[in-house]
Amino acid sequence: MGRQRSCRLTRTEQGGAGLLAPLAQPNYRHLLLSSILWWQTYSIWVVVAGVVVLDMTDSALAVALLTFWRRAAQLAFGGFAGFIGDRLGRRNTLTLSQVVIFAACVSLLLLSEGDRLNAWQITAAAFIIGAGWTVDAPARAALVPDLLGSRLSADAMMLESLTHSILIGVGAYLAGWLLDSYGAAAGFGALIALTGVNLALLIRLGRLQVPQTIPVADGGVWQSIGEGVNYLRSNRAMLVVVLISALVNIMVFPALSLMPVFARDVFERGAIGLGTLNGSYSIGLFAGLFLTQRLRRNLSFYSIFVAGSLLQCVAWVLFALSPLFNLAILLQFLAGVGQAGFYTMRNVILLTSSSNEMRGRAMSTVALSQGVGLPGELVTGSLAETAGPRLAVSVQGALATLAALAIFWKGKSARAPSQ
């Protein structure tokens, strides 16, 4: 592979050049707009697919299976995502993934309009769309330093997360309103419109000049995966981050797939209540990003990651036990604050700790850590079906908190990239 140049940042660079500094690069502005559309599509999909399947089946397990099959796609394709991005080129990979997502959404709309839409078809689409997102995500993140260099990468991650947190909340409310006012077809139509615009934008980005900072992958796929695993094991901080990411995806994030159940059956608030809970989570994410931006001036990326991970675990436990809808809204806000530190610093640590040659493969571990959440989806859905969603989410969240504390304690000697 040749000499690997690290992207590690000094303490001064960790403080950042300014949240808006990446916007000075025109190519990055195209990528940012594409990412905004990408996450807006995701937020609408979660609400639309969850509500439609729940109305069709009246089953918490069926709703949980939507996320299960999305994670199955992450597990199936996550190990190959970095290799695909290196082989095809990162921009070509983004375009291909959006074509797949667009085709899946069009198929669902046609089925809905023909009164032939069934829950299993939405579940199949969840797998296909999940595959597209799995291949897209590592290439999208790895492209940022190609456009900006390592010094501005942390600022870019913060800016993207901040922008996404605003628009995800808008997407959640929009999806709930569309379903209440116009039905499932309107929700699928919104997905098609957003994906179509994103596809056009990525085609334009593919025609722009971008410096090639990595060699095209010249080894086989299994060699690529093996190199990625060995590289991860050699970096203690990256290894802890991936382990915590896997833990949260197994025991905490499956609760997100049960949000339609909490909104309709636990709090009896329907689609609008679901949009409110998702919106509160997004507002918390927004506030947490501002807090993270301030904390990174004095704390390491790793310390912020630890705090965010533990906060969201505890918040989900308390949310599941909340007797009041208004209290549940507040706890979703706190879970969003924790998610800001967890999600943003996870990506920043992986992105800035890895060499240019290994960046795509390092980011593909995120998809893999999400894919291993498959057992959690099954357990959460089954437990929610038999014992209720409150018990399912609270017990798993409590166990996740204890396990996270053990992992952080075991890896306490791990150093943040800036250290």
Image: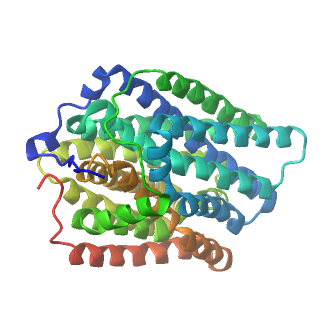
User: Foreground: 224 or 293?
Assistant: 224
In which quarter of the view is residue 171 placed? top right
Residue 22 lies, in percent from the top left, at 28, 28
Q: What residue lies at 53% left-to-right and 51% top-to-bottom?
A: 134
Residue 193 lies, in percent from the top left, at 66, 28
Q: Is residue 390 visible?
A: no
Residue 264 lies, in percent from the top left, at 66, 57
Q: What residue lies at 24% left-to-right and 53% top-to-bottom?
A: 353
Q: Is residue 252 left or right of residue 344?
A: right
In which quarter of the view is residue 176 placed? top right
Quarter of the image with the C terminus is: bottom left
User: Foreground: 327 or 203?
Assistant: 203
Q: Is residue 186 visible?
A: yes
Residue 385 lies, in percent from the top left, at 68, 74
The answer to whether residue 77 is above or below residue 273 is below
Q: What residue lies at 66% left-to-right and 59% top-to-bottom?
A: 66
Identify the image's colour scheme: rainbow, by chain, secondary structure or one colour: rainbow
Q: How many marks?
A: 0
Q: What residue lies at 18% left-to-right and 54% top-to-bottom?
A: 417
The answer to whether residue 374 is above or below residue 187 is below
